[in-house]
Amino acid sequence: MRYFCIKFILNMKKYFYFLSFLLLFVSCTEDIRFNNPAFQTLKDNNFWRAQVYTSETESNGTFVIEGSLGYEQIRFQLAEPSEKTFVLGVDDVTKATYKNTYKGQEAEFSTGTGKGNGQIVVTEYNKEDNTISGTFKFTAVNTDPTSEKQTMYFSEGVFYKIPITPQGNFVPVN
């Protein structure tokens, strides 16, 4: 009887080591999720990530990059899609806008001539893959001067490989 008990314990040790190794191996795997493309920022220090994003040239010739999450939308208007830094708060050609269209929470914040500040840096304009990437940070002013909240801050913003919809009158300069 003693022999069987010892053999049973030794077999249980093997199974225990095998199961421990198996659990260790399974727990070490990583679930990697790539955000490609991506549009995200800190909105008033709260993480915000768009679910839908697009970029295109509008019929008036301005280039637009948009990201939206439900009823919220961030929109950049640029003179052209080129790799450079666009300064906000200087004119109405280059501007950033945030809109919330949810009933009861409607709000619009924008930059423009003499209002708000910040920058949009286009780091890559890929003509072959039709994508655009860059970073942004800005302070936008409420378009309703009677509203309680007058400014909204966006920092650490990134848009990465946003697809460009081919349309409009814009002809890229080589």
Image (cartoon, rainbow, N blue to C red):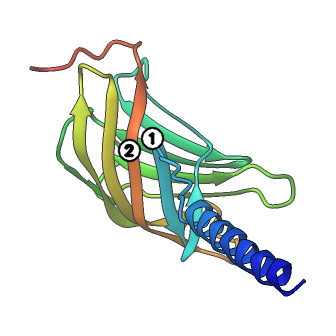
The reply to whether dot 2 and dot 1 touch (C-beta < 8 Å) is yes
Q: As shown in the figure, which amino acid type bears the numbered disc 1? A: Asn
Query: Can residue 115 be seen by looking at this rendering?
Result: no
Find residue 14 and report its horizontal and vertical position in percent: 66, 71
The residue that appears at 51% across and 68% down in the rendered structure is 42
- Residue at 35% in and 66% down: 117
Residue at the disc numbered 1: 36
Q: Nearer the viewer, residue 20 or 40?
A: 20
The one nearer the camera, 173 or 15, is 15
Q: Looking at the image, which is closer to me, 151 or 8?
A: 8
Disc 2: which residue: 160
Looking at the image, which residue sits at the far right? 1
Q: Is residue 94 left or right of residue 153?
A: left
Location of residue 39 in the rendering, given as x and y in whole percent from the top left corner:
48, 49
Q: Outermost residue toward the bottom?
A: 2
Q: Tell me the quarter of the image containing the C terminus.
A: top left
Distance from the alpha carbon under mark 2 to that under mark 1: 7 Å
Q: Quadrant of residue 156?
A: bottom left
Which quadrant holds the N terminus? Answer: bottom right
In this view of the protein, can residue 73 be seen by the observer? yes
Q: Is residue 117 left or right of residue 145?
A: left
Q: Amino acid at mark 2?
A: Tyr
For mark 1, does the 10 Å Cα neighbourhood hold few (<14), some (14 to 19), or many (20 or more) residues?
Answer: few
Q: Position of residue 170 (x, y in %)?
A: 29, 17
